[in-house]
Image (spheres, rainbow, N blue to C red):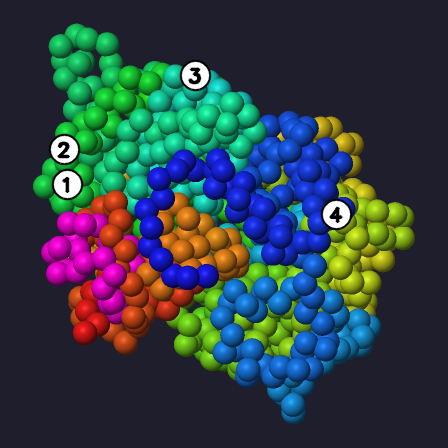
Amino acid sequence: MKKKIEEYTGPAAGWGAVKAVAQALRGQMEIGHDVIAMFDMNKVDGFDCPGCAWPDPKHTASFDICENGAKAIAWEATSKRTTPEFFAKHTVTELLSWDDFHLEDEGRLTHPMKYNPQIDKYEPIEWDEAFKQIGEKLQNYSDPNTVEFYTSGRTSNEAAFLYQLLAREYGTNNFPDCSNMCHEPTSVGLAASIGVGKATVLLEDFDKADLVICIGHNPGTNHPRMLSSLREVSKRGAKIIAINPLRERGLERFAYPQDVVEMLTLESTPLAGHYYKVRIGGDTALIKGVMKVLIERHQTALEAGQPPILDTDFISTHTHGYDALKNDVLTTGWKDILRVSGLSREAIEEIADLYSEAKNTIICYGMGITQHQHGTQNVQQLVNLLLLKGNIGREGAGICPLRGHSNVQGDRTVGITEKPSKHFLDKIAQRFGFQPPSEFGHAAVASMQAISAGSANALICMGGNLAVAMPDKEACYAGMKKLDLAVHTATKLNRSHLLTAKNTFLLPVLGRSEIDRQASGAQCITVEDSMSMVHASKGLLKPVSPYLKSECAIVAGIAKATIPATKVEWDNFIDNYDLIRDAMEVILPDFDNYNARIKIPGGFHLTNAASERRWLTQSGKANFVPTEGVIEDPKSAVNSELILATLRSHDQYNTTIYGMNDRYRGVFGQRDVVFISEGEAKKQKLKAGDKVNIIALDSNQKPTKRRLDNLTVVIYDMADRSVATYFPEANNLITLDNFDPQCGIPAYKNIPVKLEIVM
């Protein structure tokens, strides 16, 4: 496609989405049963969307699918195939020269493969032989903690549960997973503040909210089905605030493809009535400013004998630490707040007005909040704001972290964590008769540091594209090639598979849309959405190859070959997934009657103590947690003139590139661009179409060797002193050491940089 930059004037979704879906289907799928099956996605007795984790209203809609959901299923159900014949034609060295789009666009993997370093090619291998060789390797390592077990958020609850059993019976708690790179600040920050690391709201709460604050996320691209919920909020007259460095169409207006009138009249529904372009890295400063206004007004009201601004009853009954928070906020100067947030005092006071006037408020946030050196504290500032008015633990109010991958939250619920509780481990020991290790293991950064340092022997991956998703490309890529063993379970080829170890296996897995037939018949699996609803998913399509295995079967195959005296009844579990759920019910709280409850349309909700105002914290209450200063990344960004954030294009899902367009931002046929405001461009002596190099700065504001070269300047409506470009290409601008010390998430969204004009 020809490269061009062209302003997009339409709404989110609408006819643009319909056209994009048609193009995706035409480019990937055979017209027939495979396309018809899409109508069963997100329905009872159908399969759950492999895209985002936004909940489904009732799982009964006639056609509950968004543009990016359609792209995801077209990408998975493609008629293209990556066969042994393909691998026979291409060396790994050659394939490493391909771009990420064309690697995955080659199609679905069809056979188990093993890398042959003698000829630099992947070759077919029988499943039993692959399991045998993997098992022999794993048995030979004297220390189980030299093996890293990575989990992608596409993994089902059942497979994730079996996977953690495999690793723990083997002897390690090394569980790097994709949550470590997206919402670990949620798990850590919310748990410390309110005792639960998950959303406190249900979808029905959006029907009762007076105000929805959307901060640090872009629903039009990253969780498009949320647009339908925001549309209903807007239509009933409730207010929506958008706080984001870039003006995103998915926060402005939306044309609902299932509304015939809206589509035929080319009308759309306005979403955010108030839009605030916070400087990248300025969220903490902004929220502190809003709280400063509210607390000062509250004190003034009390002194004048007027009704309180804050919920004093809730604060006194349910919270701890208010005085410390108040002191911190009131002593934070406006000069710092305005400089770092990039917003005027009038704008901050307007946000405070809107929040103060609303009875019920929901705050929704994404990775624009979490992916910072102080991402955990960012999350806690949002909780602090909600607690001031008692907006947690009642209808129409609460915190709503927007999980990206479709079951990343479920994987954590069923045991994918490097820091397991004693209760969880004791339950495993009682049920299965082996003693799991208690020593905490590695999360993603620690795992990749071990791999890069050469202290790891093996990496087992349940999906994902770990090396590409991580910072510091040179260190990660070199480390992957030093491994003794790498095992990749995947549907398609990606770059991490080409960073070959001494022994590398590529194991093709069933997609979520495909029938998983075992000895007892066709199986269903379960997933958990962003709001803790657990429901069943059952594939309907014929597998693309008879040589595919399910995630569960692959885990069991590796386990039996690795642990000959295993205590786990692997064969029974694979014959009938109901038995896996029976075992999960014994170990996991709130999973009682698991098999019965997943047959209920929409599934069942996992108990959330904070939503019931039961605070599972050390203080026994919801905690106000102050944070020093207003800089999200003080080690790197305190004096930076320009801060860069990485972001997705609209034709992208995590590291998967569906195409080269970013429709809503007006970018077509290319990804080598950098977004900058008109005012900042003038300051930098740039104009649209200029070529620049991005150079990362160190903590002393000195240029480093980390850079992206020859990017095209795109003038965009966004905050000044900020720039943005796409990941994963930009991930190499940060190091493996640039992460939040509280939770370990890499600081992808706050990179100090300078621009160098290409002459």
* Real-space CA distance between mark 1 and mark 2, rounded to the nearest whole angstrom: 7 Å
Residue 17, image x, y percentages: 50, 41
Circle 2 is placed at which residue position? 345
* Real-space CA distance between mark 2 and mark 3, rounded to the nearest whole angstrom: 30 Å
- Residue 510: image quadrant is bottom right
Which residue: 29% across, 23% down?
355
Q: In this view, does 609 lie above or below 574?
A: above
Q: Does the magenta stretch include residue 691?
A: yes
* Real-space CA distance between mark 4 and mark 3, rounded to the nearest whole angstrom: 39 Å
Which residue: 56% across, 50% down?
23
Nearer-N-terminus badge (1/2):
1
Q: Residues within 10 Å of mark 1 (few under 14, many from 20)?
A: some
Q: In this view, does 41 lie above or below 553?
A: above
**Which numbered disc covers residue 338?**
1
Q: Which amino acid does label 4 sit on?
A: Gly
Q: In this view, does 124 lie above or below 725?
A: below
Magenta highlight range:
674-694
